[in-house]
Amino acid sequence: MSLHRAFTPGSATGRNVRAELLRICGGPVRKFLPLISHQGGRSALTCQFRCGNACAHGVANTSGNEYFGDIAAKALSRRGMLRAGALGAVVVGVGAAGAVPALADPGAEPEVAANGFGWGRGDLRFTPVAPNTADALTVPQGYSSSVVVRWGDPVLPDAPAFDFDNQSAAAQAKQFGYNCDYVTLFPMGHHRALLWVNHEYTDENLMFRGYTNGAAATEEQIRIALAAHGGSVVEIERRGNTGDWKLVTRGRRRYNRRITAQTPMRFSGPAAGSALLKTAADPEGRTPLGMLNNCAGGTTPWGTVLTAEENFNQYFVNGPRTPENARYSIPTGVSGRRFDRVEERFDLAKHPNEVNRFGWIVEIDPFDPQSTPIKRTALGRFAHEAATTSVGRDGRLVVYMGDDSRFEYVYKFVSKERYIPGFDRHNRTLLDEGTLYVARFTGDSPGEIDGSGKLPADGAFDGTGEWIPLVSGSESFVDGMSAEQVLVFTRLAADKVGATKMDRPEDVERNPVTGAVYVALTNNGNRTAAQVDEANPRPSNKHGHVLELVEQRDGRFTWSLPLVCGDPNDATTYFAGFDKTKVSPISCPDNLAFDRDGNLWISTDGNQLGSNDGLFVMPVRGPERGYLRQFLTVPFAAETCGPLVTDDQRSVFVAVQHPGESDGATPDNPTSHWPDGGASQPRPAVAVVWHSRGKKIGA
């Protein structure tokens, strides 16, 4: 995902002061698939297993929120105000954020260019990779790559070797899980580190021979799928002094761990114990079981992982027909993987609250394999894409989050108390009490956004915005909803306060050099010409864009679009004003990351330009701002996830998710053989890329 600060355990338990460790660490070309009616360039297979065919269903957000183009058309132009440094309109209906004394300042700014970041010029010198459809991980000339860990590799010391045709749930629970998404690294000195990886979802069509559907699957196949979800902690080691890393396969490996859909967890925060979270198996509403569809994530300054549950709705059957369930696209019938056949809790006709126990940010301590994962209810419940943390100038912890669905929202949490370096016990309570906000955007060029892609007269898609408070502890700021309701049904709360509908807000990351915040808006084929606005300026937005946000000190922000994706020859694209004849084509930005020089790295999901997905890098300051270049492509029909640039900028980790997940693919007719080649089955894996001569990435 993003570039995250590095931590190592401060004692044998891994629970002592970790802040001190911030100082450490320093193929054959394939033919194009025929076009299909799925958004984002995905195959029907990906749509089925990743998100339950979300794009084939109606948009869940049917609120009457105005698209901010409507609002802007009614307002006076704020262009002159922006130039004078003034701010936009106050919050409507809930009062100005600064006027609510119980709230922490939602505009708390981070320390910029701290902890050694930003010491370089950010120059990037490599020959971009050309778009292709090869069944290979393609990297620039002068670079090398290797596979660090793949589906089925042993995680626990007693895990058996992977056997595709003789899988078992018991084995999978000890092996590396299936699709891998978010990646982060916790260095333990120069040559060893812990690698955390999310396992987002399973594709049973590619995992099992003869698989047809969940109703016909064997119970053991369903249990294998349950065990293949979640996440993995694995110990890895550097090969000599290179940027190459490999899985540690010997010794005790005492930190290695598998988290699955059946791992005991606990709720914390204001909604813990709520009647909305109680079930027959957990009448106290405090001990959920497992996590599902973990997409992106983040880390905390005290050295833990924050992993985000995203498309959790698809795993359930027979959901009651309620407005709340409809807003979260909970199935009302029977379909999908049919986890309910082996665990009754997935049948909502019998256990209607079980679905409310998913859709959270989960905190996991990678240094304590015996610790209980924590679902942090203060951060709200929705289709979480990420949870990126930073410490504001006032010392409060800030967490940015996106809700990855069409016309959904961007959120921020600000802790009530301040982060205290080294005070681990105190810091671990910061995510339990604070204020949850949702963003409202306003353009500064009313009447000029017509969907043509033409820049407004001021030369930029830009404007102002405000963070609208939803809830703070046990106090709700949403009429008609209690604090517990706001946290469990956060989407409905955001609807009520007039948040801005965005084009699938996925990853949200903060630049460690400039302090600006970046939002990946992947695509939205459902936006009509009447619904365009300055932050979402194209109808039928199939290529997506990236938004840049700069915090102000009173709960407001300014924003602009430095990147509007697509073919550079398309007049509707924009690369921060850089010469478009020199840039790489890009489609469907998904995950974002920064290197320590402040360059923006962008991975894609569902490229609609006819080539494989890839990883791109773009300077966001200086004369090369907007000079986007493709750094790698992933194998055929795969998605690019991660990515992670190490602090020393000698390695780039990337998760290769669902290789060969194309229409018609089966184990008897695979369309990819990555990473093992030959006649092997495709296996999702984490790979690492480094400069063959030991130079820093991009040099």
Image: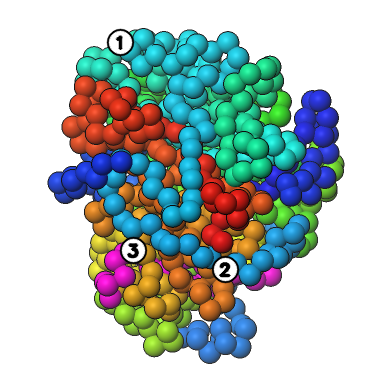
In this rendering, is residue 343 above or below 629?
Answer: above
The kind of secondary structure element at disc 3 is loop
Sequence-earlier tag: 3 or 1: 1
Q: CA distance from mark 3 to mark 2?
A: 20 Å
Sequence-earlier tag: 1 or 2: 2
Disc 3 vs disc 2: Cβ atoms closer than 8 Å? no
- The answer to whether residue 4 is visible is yes
Q: Amino acid at mark 2?
A: Asp
* Residue in view at x 82 percent, y 34 percent: 10
Disc number for residue 585: 3
Q: How many marks?
A: 3
- The answer to whether residue 358 is visible is no
In this rendering, is residue 372 above or below 20?
Answer: above
**Over which residues does the magenta segment extend?**
546-571
The percent position of residue 84, horizontal first and vertical second, equals 61, 88
Q: Amino acid at mark 3?
A: Pro
Sequence-earlier tag: 3 or 2: 2
Q: Is residue 471 left or right of residue 328?
A: right
Q: Residues within 10 Å of mark 2 (few under 14, many from 20)?
A: few
151 or 249, nearer to the observer: 249
Q: Amino acid at mark 1?
A: Thr
Residue assigned mark 1:
218
> Residue 547 colored magenta?
yes
Disc 3 vs disc 1: Cβ atoms closer than 8 Å? no
Q: CA distance from mark 3 to mark 1?
A: 44 Å
